Every structure is written in structure tokens, then in C-alpha cells.
Amino acid sequence: FSSFSCFLLLSFFFFPCLSYYRSELIIVTTLCVPLLLLGLLGNILTILVVWLRPQMRSTTYLYLSSMAVSDILMLVLMPLDLYKLWWFRPWLLGDAVCKLSQFVSECCTFSSILHMTALGAERYLAVCFPLRARLLVTRGRVRALIAALWVVALLSSAPVLVLVGVESVEGGDPECRITQFAQASGLMTAMLWLCNLYFIIPLTLLSLLYGLIARTLRQRAHAHRDHTHRQTLRMMVVIVLVFVLCWLPFHVGRTLFSLTPDPSAALYYISQYFNLVSFVLFYLSAAINPLLYNVLSARYRANVRSMLHLPPGPTASTPAQQNTPGLGQLPV
């Protein structure tokens, strides 16, 4: 489902003997550990720079700091997912850990998608209806909306608490897996459709919104504010594209397994590659955003360097010079 862990569980449901060569697991672990360290460092820096630097408390960066919280929670679960790759059976951590880890991962994934969609809608208002955006888009309202997005993500993820659990299949060792009740009751199919909608609908909306923003900016005369909007649009489009590219193998693989009535041995081997590629890309999507902010936003880069007491770059402006509306900041 929307988290890699649920995709892995789905693979185990179809292929209970799914396993990997030790060399493959070593490669995946070697790739993921640096992602864990760099992702935690980058996302923690994002939260700190937004909340400790007043000039970074724009509405855009409020969304991005909340997304950083989501990414941190997903990265914290990486050791548990690595444990499942190396020793998926027997499950020794209990039913509560099985359910809560899947629930948190699912919730964070839904939350990130909702945040990107809300941020796209805000950018649309800021560019296409700037006067209305001044009235509607305030920091207080954005904070309330962010809280509402988390509530929606929590509610959407609640079925996962029933979807997965610790079961012993045919008298074997206990596994953290998709339950037989979820499969027999249709809950697994319902969650599959919900997760597909969570991917397709936001992606469609974001494509439409960013297309309208780009058309509006092309039709207007160039101005300083339009330059700022173009910078923000460029950053957000790159973030969305990276998200889609990181998640595409996951969605292809999940649909492949879910819609195949009688998986074959060939599909078993294909599943191994989909699992491993999806695993790495899943955590890459959680770790890469701070790097994108640093590359695409001079304002973010300058404030991080200032917070860490590092000298500014050769072409960077100081944070004090960036108190005027900058990247991702509505002049409210």
C-alpha cells in the first residue's frame, strides 16, 4: 500500500517464501544507511531553520517543515523495515509494533501527499489571485490547515490497524503480515483503491494547478514578484517530480501483485527486484527534499548557513537582506 512496508507484506502474502541473497541485502542496507543519516540530518535542519529563523516562517516553509516531520518519522522506521528484509520470519516484536509501524508509515505517506496538494493550491492562489490570497492565506490558517491534513491522514490510515497483524500461517512461525480477515473481507482491495486514489487524484490536481500557474506567469509582464513565484514554482515542480519518480516503481509493483490472480514463478523473481528498488526509492523520497531545498532555494541555503554559523557563499545574500518577501513567502 502507500508505504513500502505494506508493499513488502503484500509480496509476502502472495509469496510466503520470499527471500533475498545476502549480497543483495548488504547492497540495499549499504545504500539505505547513508540515506537514513543524511535524511535525518537534513530534515531536522529544515525544521530548525523554519522555527528558529523568523524570516523563514513563510506559509510555504510551514508546509515544508511539516513534511519534514513526516519524513523523519518514516526514516526512523527504516531500521524496522531493514529488519523485515533480513528476518521477516519469525516476527518477534509483537502485534502492537507490527500494527503501529505500518500505521505510522501509512499516515506519513498520506500526510506528505496532502501537504504537497495543499501547497500547490496555495501557490495557485498566490500567483493567479494575489489579492484574495492576501486575505485567505495567513500563517494562522495555514497552521490550522496543516493540523487538519494530519487528522485526515490519521483517519485514512486507521484501516491499516486491522489490515495487518501477527499471524501464524498453517502452523508456521508468526509473521507480521496482511491478515486473512483483511483479504477475505475485501479490506485489502478497498485499501488498494484508496491508496491509488491518494496517488492519482493529487497528481492530477497538481498537474492542473502548476499548469495554470505557468500559463499565468507567461502571460504577465516580468516583475520581481513574478520572479519569486517562478523560483517557488520551479522548486515545487521538482519536489513533485522527484516524489512521483521515487514512487512509480512502488505503484507499478503493487498493482502488478494485486491484480494478478495466480502469480507465477516468473513474477516471484520480478517481485524481488521491485521490492528492493522500491525500498531504496521509498527512503530516497524521504531523505532528498532538504537537498532539493538547498540546491533550489538561495534563501533556505543562506539561512541554514547562518544558523550553523558558517560563512555565506560567494553569491549568497545574508538572511537579514532576505526579510523582504522571498522564495515561497506571501507578502502578507
Image (cartoon, grey):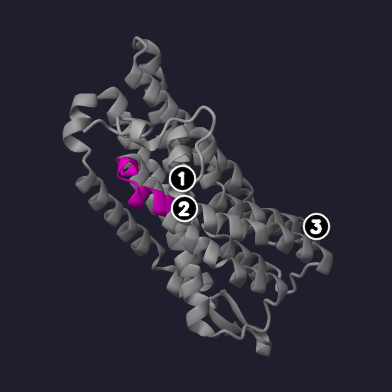
Pointer 2: what residue? 45
Q: Residue at x 54, y 85 (%)?
A: 94
Q: Are marks 1 and 2 in contact (CB under 8 Å)?
A: yes
Q: Is residue 324 left or right of residue 243?
A: left
Q: Residue at x 38, y 30 (%)?
A: 209
Q: Name which of mark 1 and mark 2 comes first in the sequence.
A: 2
| Residue 47 is covered by the magenta coloring | yes
Q: Position of residue 26 (x, y in %)?
A: 78, 65
Of the residues shown, which amino acid type is indicated by label 3?
Ala
As drawn, the label of residue 266 is 3
Sort mark 3 into few (<14), some (14-19) or many (20+) by Cα contacts within 10 Å.
few
Q: Which residues are magenta?
A: 46-58
Q: Is residue 291 left or right of residue 152?
A: right
Q: Nearer the viewer, residue 218 or 61?
A: 61
Q: Position of residue 1 (x, y in %)?
A: 53, 59
Disc 1 secondary structure class: helix
Disc 3 secondary structure class: helix
Look at discs 3 and 1 and give the one toward the viewer: 1
Q: Is residue 101 left or right of residue 81?
A: left
Q: Is residue 1 visible?
A: no
Pointer 1: what residue? 304
Q: Is residue 9 left or right of residue 65?
A: right
